Amino acid sequence: MIYNPVKVDVDELRAAVAAEPGTEGWAETRWFATTEEDPGTGQAHRALEDGADLVIAAGGDGTVRAVAQVIAGSAASLALLPSGTGNLLARNLDLTLDDLANSIHVAFTGSDRKIDLAWADIRREDGRVERRAFLVMAGLGLDAKMLSHTDEDLKAKVGWLAYVDAIRKALRDKNRLRMRYRLDGHGTRAVSAHTLIIGNCGSLPANILLLPDAAIDDGRFEAVFLRPESAWGWLQIFVKVIWENGVLRRTKVGRKLVSRDVDALRYIKGRRIDVVLSRPEELELDGDGFGRTKAFRTWVEAGGLAVRVPAEGQ
């Protein structure tokens, strides 16, 4: 059990594990707390060194991302105990939220599902390259600036509503992303955009389907460039994402009515993308800021992670 002591009540968590009948036959659970300095990577390494077959991540998206980065490709499975405001991976896997007993039960009695893991090689301003994994989305532009403007105290009190004020602040920044990108090794293209989001899966809180063709187990990502030139462009984005993606695409008849790309949105899909920016920009992975980058490469490792989901009939 790798848990974030800020996000979860460890006494309640221990009691839930002790009460779970599915733990019969398992060895004693080992407990590792994350810290501000180490959000889960060191703890995950120690868990694997201990011979763990199952690693349970109890915390927010940052805890899940840090743990998954380490256990990917190992013989261990990852189970989720969603906590925090996002729970992006749990939402995209349709796992139950805010039900500790159920999450523990699924961890010990569920089935493994192979999902894709996305990786990013991030080139820093000094030329260093850092490799990080992400499970849901990577973002540049408004997406990353919004996170840098988010008041953490306000977020703790009102959850996702804290991002409304952060978006307002981010929209004041009129600088656009100017970049060159190459998709799957093909020709290089230049683009100017407000935001670039690359998704291993596509759903956000509040039932928002940002990337409608992103699937967590198809070996590819979907990316979107947001390119609004005016208030009309933002309206196009709102209609496309909230109405068409969020409502029409969820029915067979509605899918026939969905329009193609609009001027303010451009979707692409692939297995690898190389991006070079005209200037260093803020980057986010799975809702956490990762500093500034001047270039990065993102690719998908198909079936790179085994995640516990409810067994058939659960």
Image (spheres, rainbow, N blue to C red):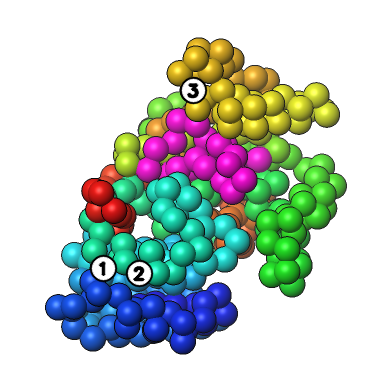
Q: CA distance from mark 1 to mark 3?
A: 35 Å
Residue named by callout 2: 104
Q: Residues within 10 Å of mark 2 (few under 14, many from 20)?
A: many
Q: Are marks 1 and 3 in contact (CB under 8 Å)?
A: no
| Left or right: 75 in relation to 4 | left
Q: CA distance from mark 1 to mark 2?
A: 7 Å
At horizontal 74% and vertical 59% (from top left) the residue drawn is 162
Q: Which residues are magenta?
A: 195-216
Looking at the image, is 90 positioned above or below residue 64? Answer: above
Q: Are marks 1 and 2 in contact (CB under 8 Å)?
A: yes
Amino acid type of disc 2?
Ile
At horizontal 78% and vertical 43% (from top left) the residue drawn is 175
Q: Along the line of sight, which residue is nearer the eye, 269 or 29?
A: 29
Residue 213 percent coordinates (x, y): 45, 30
Looking at the image, is 27 positioned above or below residue 162? Answer: below
Q: CA distance from mark 2 to mark 3?
A: 33 Å
| Left or right: 287 in relation to 184 | right
Q: Report if residue 181 is visible in the image.
A: no
At horizontal 46% and vertical 82% (from top left) the residue drawn is 12
Q: Quadrant of the N terminus?
A: bottom left
Task: Determine if the magenta segment contains residue 50.
Answer: no
Residue named by callout 3: 251
| Left or right: 25 in relation to 231 | left
Q: Quadrant of residue 33?
A: bottom left
Q: Residues within 10 Å of mark 3 (few under 14, many from 20)?
A: few
**Disc 2 on helix, strand or loop?**
helix
At horizontal 60% and vertical 61% (from top left) the residue drawn is 85
Residue 136 percent coordinates (x, y): 47, 50
The circle on residue 108 is 1
